[in-house]
Image (cartoon, helix red, strand yellow):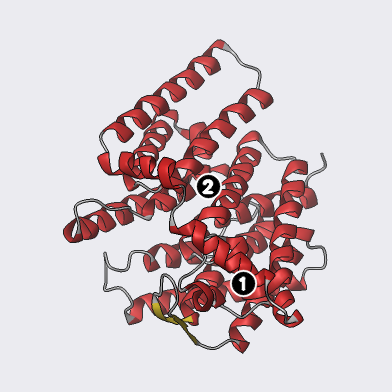
Amino acid sequence: MTVRIFNRLNISIILYVVYYLQGVLYPSGSFFSQFFILIFLLIGIQSLCKTVLYNKNPLFIRVWLILYLVLAFSFIVSPKIVYGTLYESIGTVETFDQFKGMSIFCLSLFIPFSHIRKYGIKDSYISNITIIFFILMLIRYFFNKDILSIERDSFTNNVGYFAISVLPYIIFFFKKNRIIALIMFISITLIVIDSAKRGAIVCLAISVLFSVVYYLRMNKLSLKRLCLLLLLMCAFAVVAYYGVMRNEYLQMRIETTHEDGIGTRSIAYYVLWHHWMSETNLIKLLFGNGISGSVSVWGNYAHNDWLELLIDNGLIGVLLYATFFCSTFVYVNHIKLSFSYKCSAYLILIIWVLKTFFSMGYTEGTNAVYIILLGIILGNNEYRKKHYTY
């Protein structure tokens, strides 16, 4: 295994972290932030090219490559400005913003995958970047909270989804230091609940449930392991209950969900679906209306990956996205890595799939945190397939 400190993976992670410290270390949208993300994207494109030149790519990589090329072509041929004047009507939108988020997210799979497939990785490396992303999440959370608290008394904090993205990393830290891992887990739980993002809370609950079930299935329970598992479950239950009880705004949002469902989202989903179903142009049915087409139809983004793709990139986009998930799940099911790698990979895919139905997945750059880890895991499996005989 070759170890190099200054490699494109490490440089990319540094650039990503510094980019998302804009507003904290330096002004948002400044020359520095644009420079950092430009270098990150250039490294991503280089990694994509290296991946293309490799002649034995797994199916999920080939599908992801095709999907990104479809998204890139869609951006090139689409108007650079769209107008959200209907329904939610968010006004003028530059399509480059969404394409930049897509590019950060999509290219973040190629960077670790192409590097680690060649050089491999140690568990300690993942533990180290766990600390980095956890600290970044804390900084963003408190920074956002301070800004939002100035504007209003009650609010949702989108960093709740960022916290969920860090969750799959924590599994690796349990092997290094269980106490610190438990503190991280409790912190993430409190932050997700305090963020009052219902989707993030659903992701957290299902992630914890899956982790427990998967652990019970894959490991023989000793008394020590059983005690640790019970301790984690009790900690989660107590922290979750405490968090919900002290957050009146979250309680109100949960009660509203019981009474009104998902609110305007249900109207948006109907409008977007009906628009595609009523489309008579075969080209638009297959390839969509272009990037950010949902803004023209609904007045805002779909906040649902499947409908966003359906409107923007048509049936082709949806089929490619679905094929990627199916092929990746099959691949993960057959990898021969340790419990930590496999459980973490499943968690990433579960969180990602859940987010596709009520939030933004492939269009949101902050989600790159978990796809970086997915690239590390899958790349390491390719490395071991080449260098080890099972």
Q: Residue at x 46, y 51 (%)?
A: 262
Q: Residue 277: which quarter of the image?
A: bottom right
Residue at 62 percent across and 61 percent down: it is 306
Q: Judging from the image, what secondary structure is the residue with disc 1 in?
A: helix
**In the drawing, does residue 109 fall left or right of residue 171?**
right
Q: How many marks?
A: 2
CA–CA distance between discs 1 and 2? Answer: 44 Å
Q: Is residue 93 above or below residue 64?
A: below
Can you tell which quarter of the image residue 28 is in? bottom left
Q: Nearer the viewer, residue 40 or 386?
A: 40
Q: In the rendering, at what x and y percent does residue 212 appear? A: 57, 28
Residue at 61% across, 80% down: 290
Q: Whole-percent x and y of residue 183?
A: 37, 34
Q: Are marks 1 and 2 in contact (CB under 8 Å)?
A: no
Q: Is residue 125 left or right of residue 329?
A: left
Q: Is residue 255 above or below residue 69?
A: above
Q: Earlier in the sequence, mark 1 or mark 2?
A: 2
Q: Amino acid at mark 1?
A: His
The picture places residue 33, in percent across and down from the top left corner, at 37, 75
Image quadrant occupied by the C terminus = top right
| Disc sitting over residue 126 in the figure | 2
Secondary structure of residue under mark 2: helix
Examine the rendered structure and indicate whether residue 99 appears above or below residue 25: below
Crowding near the residue tagged with mark 2, few <14, some 14–19, many ≥20 C-alpha atoms within 10 Å: some
Circle number at residue 275: 1
For residue 341, the mark is none
Residue 4, image x, y percentages: 56, 60
Q: Is residue 199 above or below residue 366?
A: above
**Amino acid type at mark 2:** Ile
Q: Nearer the viewer, mark 1 or mark 2?
A: 1
